[in-house]
Amino acid sequence: MSYASNKLLFPYSRKGRLVFFFSIFWFLSGSFLFLHTLILKNHIQEQQIQTAERALRTYFEHNGGVSGTHLSLQNDLPYQLDFIRLVSGKDQLLITGNSRMDFSGLVELNPLEQGAWIDLKRPKKQGNWLLVSQTLANGSIAQAGKNDSGSGLAIYKKSVTDAYWFFILSGVIALGLAFLSASLIRYPLRQLESDIEKGLKQKSLLFQESREQLDDLAPLYHLLEQIFFQNRQLIQEIQSSLDNVAHDLRTPMTRLRAVAEYALQSDRNEPQLYRSALSDCLEESERVLSMLKVMMSVAEAEAGTMRLELQEIDVLKTLEDVVGLYQYVAEEEQITVSCTGESGVLVQADKTRISQVWANLLDNGIKYGHESGNVTITAERDNGEAVIRFYDDGMGISETEINRIWDRLYRGDRSRTKQGLGLGLNFVKAVIEAHGGRVLVTSSLQEGSCFDVRLPLHHGATQKS
Ligand code: ADP
């Protein structure tokens, strides 16, 4: 069997989701990095402008011109500045400290322009400029500048480029590593998948080799083997149960058919014969119907959908009623049935279902008992529970069978000579558990069995105990 056709489309597959979440994470990190570089840029620019402004102010202070009206420009330019330009109306004065630079383009520059990393267009090939501007007391405008090539902007650009490269490379590497580790993690699972596929084809799931190779998956392999083994056992049981059902249904159905055929072939003027044939048919069909009903009840109880009509019932009373019904059968088998116990042991239960449980346990006790044997039934209170015990001194149950008697359609090997469907105990267990109780069995071969049913006492009754 191949699951290739069931594969999800890439966007919805695990890989697709991995890429999707990774892209979101990457996009957010990228945005964060971008914001960070913007903040860094503003910060560097602000610092540069402040330094240049301070240098310009200090220069004029030393030359008596910030607040005064008389300038005497005698000092050299500070190293933070490459030029100072004084503009008063149409007159311009340029003070430079760097004779190798071409300052001719400054003539057209707006004297109030300032900022960092400004591309002046002219003079060309001299990089970006830092410009600050100040109005002096005499009304003229002082504009100062510093060529920025090789310093702040270049360092900023280089670090931003490096950061982006690092970001892209680390993203690609991280994504690659994520895929690699995902496929490494998937490797043993793929191995497991192919082992199961192989095992299913060969109808045998024994993973000895893989279990040794992939020792971290050994417990999983072991569990799979167990599941497979249990399934095989279950299938075998279902097959043998189906055989049993077919066998048990065949007898009443064959009888029904034979009676009907016989009646049809006989003389038409014998209404008495028809009557008796119809009555036999009715009896057999009742039998088949009751078998099917039990099967359905068990299925309902196991699925938790059995409807219980709960009422307060006296356990001993219901037991005595059932014993009364089985008196005739017990006498036929020469078995003595006795029923003793405390009266007033009350439980909340569905009377019909509980009586069916008692009937099944008593029926088994008689069916699997010895000639002239005994079946003893007791009812008492114990620790807030009603305890009902069915003892018999019959054939008993072997150790190998005792855990299987509760299974649906299971019949003991030595019980085949007796009529039965293998549904009785399954029904008993399902109904008792549906009432919140439990049922246990102890037995010894050829000595007898004891079925121990425990039901929660009805509240009013617990206080009496
Ligand atoms: P059935 O009686 O139709 O076979 P049950 O579910 O009632 O089905 O019982 C299952 C099996 O448990 C029986 O086939 C029998 O082997 C064993 N069993 C049940 N009750 C007794 C008993 N009282 N003594 C011995 N064996 C029993």
Image (cartoon, grey):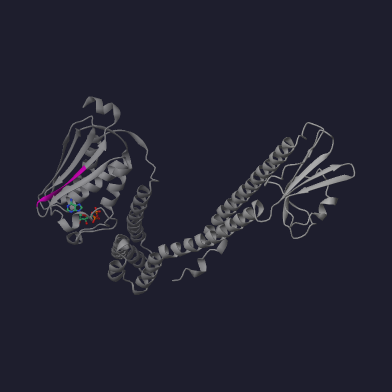
- Is 325 or 180 nearer to us in this picture? 180
Q: 438 or 263: nearer the eye?
A: 438
Q: Please identify the quarter of the rendering in which residue 343 is found.
A: top left
Magenta region, mostly helix, strand or loop? strand
- The quadrant of the rendered image in which ligand 1 is seen is bottom left
Where is residue 251 shown, x and y percent of the image? 29, 63
Residue 105, picture quadrant: bottom right
Residue 59 image offset from top left, x and y in percent: 72, 39
Q: Magenta segment, which residues?
A: 447-452
Q: Residue furthest bottom?
A: 202
Q: From the viewer's perspective, is residue 261 above or below residue 147?
A: below
Can the viewer see residue 32?
yes
Determine the image quadrant of residue 346: top left
Q: Position of residue 69 (x, y in %)?
A: 82, 32
Residue at image point 18% right, 49% down: 365
Figure check: 447 above or below 267: above
* The N terminus sits in image quarter: bottom left
Task: Check residue 451 for magenta coloring.
Answer: yes
Q: From the viewer's perspective, tell me whether residue 156 is left or right of residue 102.
A: left
The spot of residue 32 in percent (x, y) is: 59, 49
**In this figure, what is the number of numbered marks?**
0
Quadrant showing the C terminus? top left
Within the magenta stretch, is there residue 17?
no
